[in-house]
Image (cartoon, grey):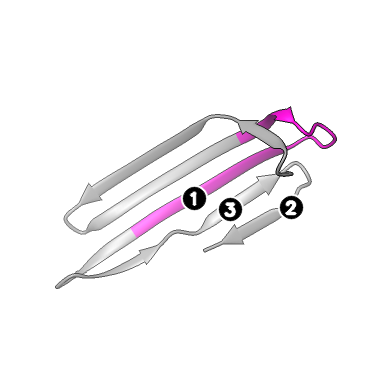
Amino acid sequence: MTGNQWLLGPELALGITDDWGVAAFLVAHQWDVAGDNKKTTSITSLEYVFAYGLGDGWQVFTAPSVFLTTGKQIAVTS
């Protein structure tokens, strides 16, 4: 993906909040629709969020992301 590309695609988010904390999941896919067309771009991203309340304002939280591209590269960030 270059800075001269425009991407468009669907996203879906599901989540739950409860007394114990929060859990959510986000999946998105984007294709290049305009701009620099020298390279085709197709990106799928997956992210989950989990926060567990320990009490007294303390919590454990994580939100890693996974990106899949047409070049079959996989990147995981947290």
Within the image, what quadrant is residue 15 found in?
top left
Q: Position of residue 53 (x, y in %)?
A: 23, 65
The residue positioned 85% from the left and 35% from the top of the image is: 38
Q: CA distance from mark 2 to mark 1?
A: 16 Å
Residue type beneath disc 3: Val
State the extent of the magenta-drawn residues as a range: 30-50
- For this view, does 44 lie left or right of residue 50? right
The residue positioned 37% from the left and 48% from the top of the image is: 24
Q: Position of residue 34 (x, y in %)?
A: 71, 27
Q: Secondary structure at mark 2?
A: loop
Residue 73 is marked as 2
Q: Are marks 1 and 3 in contact (CB under 8 Å)?
A: yes
Q: Please name the predominant secondary structure of the magenta segment in the image.
A: strand
Q: Looking at the image, is mark 1 or mark 3 earlier in the sequence?
A: 1
The residue positioned 71% from the left and 36% from the top of the image is: 5
Query: Is 56 a magenta residue?
Result: no
The residue carrying pointer 3 sits among few (fewer than 14), some (14 to 19) or many (20 or more) residues within 10 Å by Cα, namely some
Q: Looking at the image, is mark 3 or mark 2 earlier in the sequence?
A: 3
Foreground residue among 40 and 2? 2
Residue 47 is marked as 1
Q: Position of residue 46 (x, y in %)?
A: 53, 47
| Residue under numbered circle 3 | 66
State whether residue 31 is above or below residue 15. above
Q: Looking at the image, is mark 2 or mark 1 earlier in the sequence?
A: 1
